[in-house]
Image (tube, rainbow, N blue to C red):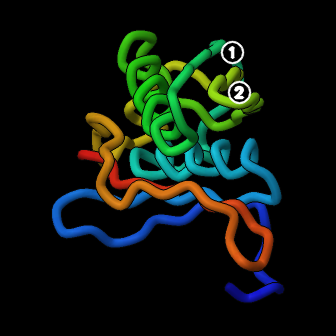
């Protein structure tokens, strides 16, 4: 990774049938928040989503990799139940527990122009680690 690349950030990575989402951050909280932005970006441009409403999310898992999939799946669930998209994420991880606030708005099909529907996060290419350069990485493939 190039040290001049901006952190935190999110990325997509190719996968045969689905889409990989990756979050990078200076700490685990940032990496998870950026992975959530990558998830949103599979659907539409996060910059087009106004942070008008806030949803609180809490997850627990036996390790950080499973915590990532639980977090992303919780977001998919909240998007479906509330018919919302999210563009801002405040994440706090303490051991095996994640507490977060996701901010966004109701889906506006004309303005947001959703390109895909994310069905869920998978264990495919699941990885959460601190890289040699000190940057935290969180990634997995999402089913679309």
> Circle 2 — which element?
loop
- Residue projecting furthest to the front: 62
Instruction: Identify the residue at image location x=72%, y=78%.
Output: 132
- Residue projecting furthest to the left: 17
**Residue closest to the eye, 82 or 17:** 17
Residue 9 visible to the viewer: no
Instruction: Identify the residue at image location x=30%, y=44%.
Output: 122
Q: Position of residue 120 (x, y in %)?
A: 31, 36
How packed mark 2 is, by other alpha carbons closer than 10 Å (few <14, some 14-19, many 20 or more), is some
Q: Is residue 93 above or below residue 125?
A: above
- Per the image, the residue denoted by label 1 is 54
Instruction: Identify the residue at image location x=51%, y=40%.
Output: 68
Q: Is residue 132 above or below residue 8?
A: below
Q: Position of residue 15 (x, y in %)?
A: 27, 68
Judge left or right: residue 30 versus residue 68. Answer: right
Judge left or right: residue 118 versus residue 66. Answer: left
Judge left or right: residue 41 versus residue 20. Answer: right
- Per the image, the residue denoted by label 2 is 51
Q: Are marks 2 and 1 in contact (CB under 8 Å)?
A: yes
Q: Quadrant of the N terminus?
A: bottom right
């Amino acid at each position: 990774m190039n040290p001049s690349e901006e952190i935190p950030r999110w990325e997509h990575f190719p996968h045969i049938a689905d889409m990989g989402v990756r979050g990078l951050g200076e700490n685990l909280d940032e990496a998870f928040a950026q992975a959530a932005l990558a998830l949103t970006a599979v659907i539409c441009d996060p910059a087009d989503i106004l942070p008008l409403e806030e949803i609180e999310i809490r997850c627990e898992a036996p390790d950080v990799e499973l915590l990532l999939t639980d977090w992303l799946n919780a977001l998919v669930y909240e998007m479906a139940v509330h018919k919302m998209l999210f563009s801002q994420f405040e994440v706090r991880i303490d051991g095996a527990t994640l507490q977060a606030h996701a901010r966004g708005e109701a889906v506006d099909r004309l303005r947001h122009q959703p390109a895909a529907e994310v069905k869920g996060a998978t264990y495919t290419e699941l990885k959460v680690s601190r890289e040699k350069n000190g940057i935290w990485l969180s990634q997995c493939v999402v089913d679309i």
